[in-house]
Image (cartoon, coloured by chain):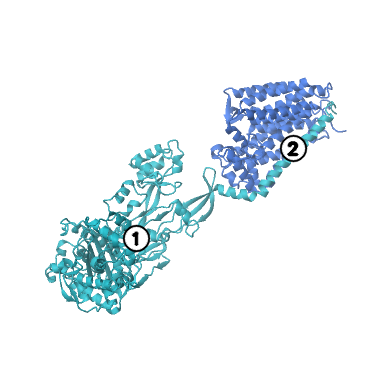
Amino acid sequence: MTNAPETGRTSRVRIRLVIMQVLLLSFLCTLGGRLWYLQVRNGAEYYHEAKSNHVQQVVQPAVRGSILDARGVPLADNETRLVVSASRTALMKMKDKGKGVLTRLAGVLDMTPQDVMNKVRVCDSQTPKPCWNGSPYQPIPVTTEATTQQALQIRERPEEYPGITAEPTAVRRYPAPGGANTGQVLGYLSPVTDDEIQKAKNTNSPLLRSDQVGRFGLERTYDRTLRGKSGVTRYEVDNLGRVMGQAKNDPTVAGAHLVTSIDARVQGVAEYELNAAMVEARKQIDRNTGVPYKADAGAVVVLESKTGRVVAMASMPTYDPNVWVGGISGKDYAKLTAKEANVPLMNRAIQGQAAPGSIFKVIPTAAAVNAGYDFDGDYPCPSSYAIGGQVFKNFESQGHGNITLGRALEVSCDTVFYALGHQQWIKDGGLHPKKPPAEIFYKTAHQFGLGAETHVDLPGEEKGRVPDRAWKQKFWQANKDMWCKSGKKGGTYVELLSYENCLEGNLMRAGDAINYSIGQGDTLVTPIQMATIYAAISNGGTMWNPTIGKAVISADGKHVEPIPPQSHGKLPMTEATRVKINAALEGVATRGTAAWRFGGWPQKQIPMHAKTGTAEVYGKQTTSWFATYTEDFTIVMTISQGGTGSGASGPAVRNIYNAIYGLSMSGKQDTEKAFLLKPEAKLPTIGPDGTIDAPDIKPYVPPSPEDLAPPALAGPPAPPAARQD
Amino acid sequence: MQTANKFSVSRYAPERGTMAKLTSRDSVLRRLDWPILLSALALSFIGALLVWSATRNRTQLNQGDPYYFLIRHALNTGIGLVLMIGTVWLGHRTLRGAVPILYGLSLVLILAVLTPLGATINGAHAWIVIGGGFSLQPSEFVKITIILVMAMLLATRVDAGDLVHPDHRTVVKALCLAAAPMGIVMLMPDLGSVMVMVVIVLGVLLASGASNRWVVGLMGSGAAGAVLIWQLGVLDEYQINRFAAFANPELDPAGVGYNTNQARIAIGSGGLTGSGLFKGSQTTGQFVPEQQTDFVFTVAGEELGFLGAGLILVLLGIILWRACMIARETTELYGTIVCAGIIAWFAFQAFENIGMTLGIMPVAGLPLPFVSYGGSSMFAVWVAVGLLQSIRVQRPMSA
């Protein structure tokens, strides 16, 4: 059959062929074994690795809820803007670290290349602002105000702008309805930091890299509520990140809206009037220093007397909260933090601390009654009060003879309170108390909520200070080394003061007690504390925690969760005392130190109560304080280095009341014009589609000079005597 | 097959009709090794599916046509089948006379690669671009000619009955003839192919019955050379790292290490039954580079699982096992040597290719026979199948 020779098969070849076959078999077994090891034995592990390999998360940020005023007018909402962002990771991969791209981008956006580069650099301890303090892996917004033209230029030529995106994005907006900027109350947002992500990781509201978080004001207090929950779409992607399909999704939950008790109209008036009062004060010459008042800062708080809800809260100097949107620019940040700017970010209504001056006197009045003094007793009001060679003068050195405590409030007689304070000091044991002193005047101040937070729903509230013996001791411990070093016997005033402080700064001296009795010396309060106290006097004695948030309403309007006001105690006085103080404060407005500011006020329909205060601050001009209330509203205003209480703040407070009640200077009420005859009780309605039913707001038109002229019926301006604060 | 006068199984057989020839007891069809043919066809078919799955999303490769590689793979298989039939038709003995011509031709071809006609693909200057999207990798054909030229030299005097085993002079001559094309391939540099050729030479020497000294000496000098290269620092550290990255991907995390790691994830994630064809996330996500060629086994691992990947091993095993049987059955040394060369070639290439995807062999650019996409490789392996079939067809029938 074949001619093939039969010589090819030797035993050597045969054995070698068998060896080859065995080798082959072992190779195949090796492969099979390894395959089994990878796929069957460790398959699950690789399965998970493959999963994490190809799933990419894309975050759709939840629309942040709006902050609304009591009638639904948005104080903070969102608008769609064209945001141009740069991906740092993409830029860093380029040879020139993205310099070329950013320079071209700057050209399109009409910015300088340096500005653009500053925006995309990542913040660290050495980098000055502006810089990006969010995650470097997230697109960094270069501008939130690109025009359609600019966005098109970028999007049409992606090859020229690698790593740059231009997309419509919901951006926070602070529309300042009717001029109600509300800056410090609203606060601002900034990108989340890595630290915060780590901290929030295992909570029930974890943060995503793209999140913005509230940094101040309501945006911070109600951050979780407003933020909602970002949606996460998990895409299956290929090795280049191209999307192949969708995996599991977490839906976006839009942030809820925060309805506040703020009335944008009243807020607008308050801001305008505060500023106007400060501008006016700067035109007045301070008789003590001989130069115009500086009026460098001020605050005003409008509360609902019966609930402690905040109707308006303004702080000067102020700023436009919109500067924070999309990352603050270097210029804006420098402006905000410049020394001349005088910390506009600070909300002085809750963070500004100053000696209260005479508006403090309701506290020693109550304290005196609690210490056993008769409210209606006879108390001498001489022009001055002298102890041990030190003379404490009455304001403008006026005397009033023997008067009741009520009258002492009306005319703001300092010497009555000097004597009460001094007597208590002696009773407590003077410089060296033998047994623990009762310190009734100080204890009462604590009971009034001073030296503690009012628990207003804003972050960063200051506590103020009640300068009692315990505080003096603590303060001396902290400062004595410094005092003892700089103090000199017989030196300058400051050196002498330090010398005395060094020796006995831990002791409560008679002068301290006397200064304290009229809210001077080391006493510090915030405007919100005083507003809380005066509202409590008005409402029967309940000290409400001032609240701005009134209700949280879900984005679709279905879920309404009211925020009920809470109280932090009752005023430390009997109802009888409160009625008497209330009457005295009405006297202040009708015949006392504030009467000249309330000429023509319809006292019968809307009983006005007031207390003026002019606090002296060493080395500075006097602080103007004005505390007032009606049945429904309480207004406290203060102007630093602004002059007297009624003088500097009086007209502004009167104008705010006029606007609230729709009153003219002559006392004629136009209910159509009135903002709030009563505090707003209803909540705004939000439709299922998210539409908010809100009225339009017109900017505040201040009264014309003719309107401001004192009405004929009010009589001539009050004599200087009545301006005693 | 119609030209019956040329298609002679045996020159001494009386002339018969075509049908009779194909159906009679000693017909070509009956004498064909069907397990090898069917296994090779099955592997090519599985390969077509895997190549399709790996490339249907690779738009930058397939020019927007998801079937681009599928069609070409099928076409390559078809051409390969024709080449196999041609080989069987000519017969390995006829080819034996043409070996010097084939050898010269392949030398010319690989030399052409070194001229401006050559092209570099994936770092190896091993290609001749023909045009129209086709290119040739001559080193694939060189594998065959090395086998044939060595078999011819080593077997001639043994088959003639002059010698029991090839003598030293013949072995030296054969080695020199093999070394010439290998040296050129080394210059390309296509080290993977050189490795295969070294193993082929080893297999050929083994089967030829050459003295043990040659076999041991060749293996010893290979090992000594490797140690020498290592010790003399001829290779840069990155080259060593690339080589060693199969065991420790961290040595070259962006390059070979990435490939190895992704390949291992792909195969491991397949589990017992795989994710199903077209459903592998590693494959559709294109995480494994060169997945239609060198890393095609990862598609099988991920989408067909242990069962599918195991089937490929079994099919390869059948081909190799049957080839061993043919080598043992044939009576002439020439056929035995050719079979052994092909076995060494297929076995090493399969072991290296699959081994590297499993992370037990260093990464080298070698295709998986029948399964990987690639014309030259496909043609060469089918010609090799043709040689195996021819050897079997022309073996002496047991009486």
- Mark 2, Cα crowd under 10 Å, few <14 / some 14-19 / many 20+, is many
Q: Is residue A41 left or right of residue A636?
A: right
Residue A448 percent across, percent down from the top left: 32, 70
Residue A147 percent across, percent down from the top left: 34, 46
Residue A550 percent across, percent down from the top left: 36, 66
Please tell me how many numbered marks the rendered image carries.
2
Amino acid carrying mark 1 in the image: Gln
Q: Quadrant of the N terminus of chain A?
A: top right
Q: Which disc number belongs to residue B346?
A: none
Query: Is there a contact, CB below 8 Å, between mark 1 and mark 2?
Result: no
In the depicted structure, whether residue A525 falls above or below residue B143 = below
- Mark 1, Cα crowd under 10 Å, few <14 / some 14-19 / many 20+, is few
Describe the element under mark 2 as helix, strand or loop: helix
Q: Is residue B371 left or right of residue A209?
A: right
Q: Nearer the viewer, residue A231 or B100?
A: A231
How many angstroms separate mark 1 from mark 2 (CA)?
95 Å
Q: Are marks 1 and 2 on the same chain?
A: no
Q: Chain of mark 2?
A: B
For the question of whether residue A508 can be seen, the reply is yes
Residue A249 percent across, percent down from the top left: 51, 55
The shade of chain A is cyan
Question: Which residue does the numbered mark 1 point to in the structure image?
Answer: A477
Amino acid carrying mark 2 in the image: Ile
Q: Nearer the viewer, residue B289 or B106?
A: B289
Q: Nearer the viewer, residue B13 or A270?
A: A270
Q: Nearer the viewer, residue A307 or B329?
A: A307
Q: Chain of mark 1?
A: A
- Chain corresponding to blue in the figure: B
Question: Which residue does the numbered mark 2 point to in the structure image?
Answer: B319
